[in-house]
Amino acid sequence: MSDLYASLSLILANTYAADKEIRQKAEKDLEGFLKLSNAFNGFLGLCQLPGTDTNIKLAAALTLKNKARDFWQTKDPIYPMTEDEKTYCKDAIITLILNETYNPLRSLLAEVLKGIVEHEYPTNWPQLLPTLVTNLSSPEPIKIYNTLIIIRKLTKFYQFSKLPKRTILYDIIIAVFPTLQGLISSLLNHNTIEVAMVFHITLKIFYSCVMHTLPKLPVESQSACDINFWFQFMSFILEKNLPENDGSGSEPIGQQIHPDERKQWR
């Protein structure tokens, strides 16, 4: 397996080579690798392999992002996968994202996941949503934040959907929002950059869920999305102090001071 990863790493590195002949050969070799059995998992494995150069991981994730449809489309996939391979890869990419701390790689992997969701969720991936809800209560802050990134990607995929497909978004709201609202409530008095990032991503999730139309949930589930709570939360965020360049240590602790840096962080 180590030889396989070494070969794939070299191929990916050479696809960015300045020499045209080397680059073209690498692209041909990459196409050959994509046709191998369980190739999708090979790229995922490289992304989580200790000691792998970050740029190689990014190249592997980018390849999966660009080729996801060719693996996962249900009709005539270019790179067919067995159901066992698909199940393993779906579990593997969730684990990868939940533990990833490098944002560029995490963002690419989330795009890969979106490509899988397009063809697998919810019919062939019913366990995805329960897994996300469970990880929202993880004792590890990084897993909570990364779970929110996945939920944001999931809600964004369905944000413009119309009925009946929009009911998938409603199912996500019903499952996720009670835990999400509880999480926000528990963090309101915490003034750190990490909490600010959680607030940021949760507001994006809410935006994706309501931007097209307010949720029309079944009567028995309407309490799952407390609109008043979200507007109160937005009011809280708008009224929250920002740090000034006076050395006072104003909240939220750790946020950039210079206006240009604040814009980049946003």
Image (cartoon, rainbow, N blue to C red):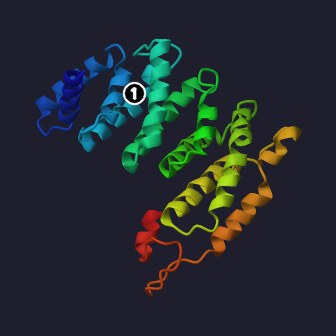
Position of residue 168 measured from the top left corner of the image (x, y, whole percent): 70, 33
Position of residue 18 measured from the top left corner of the image (x, y, whole percent): 13, 40
Q: Is residue 19 above or below residue 235?
A: above
Name the residue rendered at 68%, 60% in the picture.
Answer: 185
Question: Among all residues in the image, which is located at the extreme front?
Answer: 139
Position of residue 157 measured from the top left corner of the image (x, y, whole percent): 59, 38
Q: Sort mark 1 into few (<14), some (14-19) or many (20+) by Cα contacts within 10 Å.
A: some
Q: Is residue 251 left or right of residue 231?
A: left
The N terminus is located in which quarter?
top left
Position of residue 26 measured from the top left corner of the image (x, y, whole percent): 19, 27
- The answer, for residue 75, to whether it is visible in the render is yes
Q: Is residue 15 above or below residue 88?
A: below
Question: Among all residues in the image, which is located at the extreme bottom?
Answer: 246
Question: Among all residues in the image, which is located at the extreme right?
Answer: 219
Name the residue rendered at 23%, 22% in the picture.
Answer: 4
Instruction: Assign a secondary structure to mark 1.
Output: helix
Q: Nearer the viewer, residue 123 or 21?
A: 123
The amino acid type found where label 1 is placed reads: Lys
* Residue 77 figure quarter: top left
- The answer, for residue 76, to whether it is visible in the render is no
* Residue 20 figure quarter: top left
Q: Which residue is mark 1?
A: 67
Name the residue rendered at 62%, 42% in the picture.
Answer: 155
Q: Is residue 251 left or right of residue 8?
A: right
Q: Is residue 113 left or right of residue 61?
A: right
* Residue 108 figure quarter: top left
Q: Is residue 166 above or below residue 259?
A: above
Q: Is residue 118 left or right of residue 247?
A: right
Instruction: Count up the numbered dots.
Output: 1
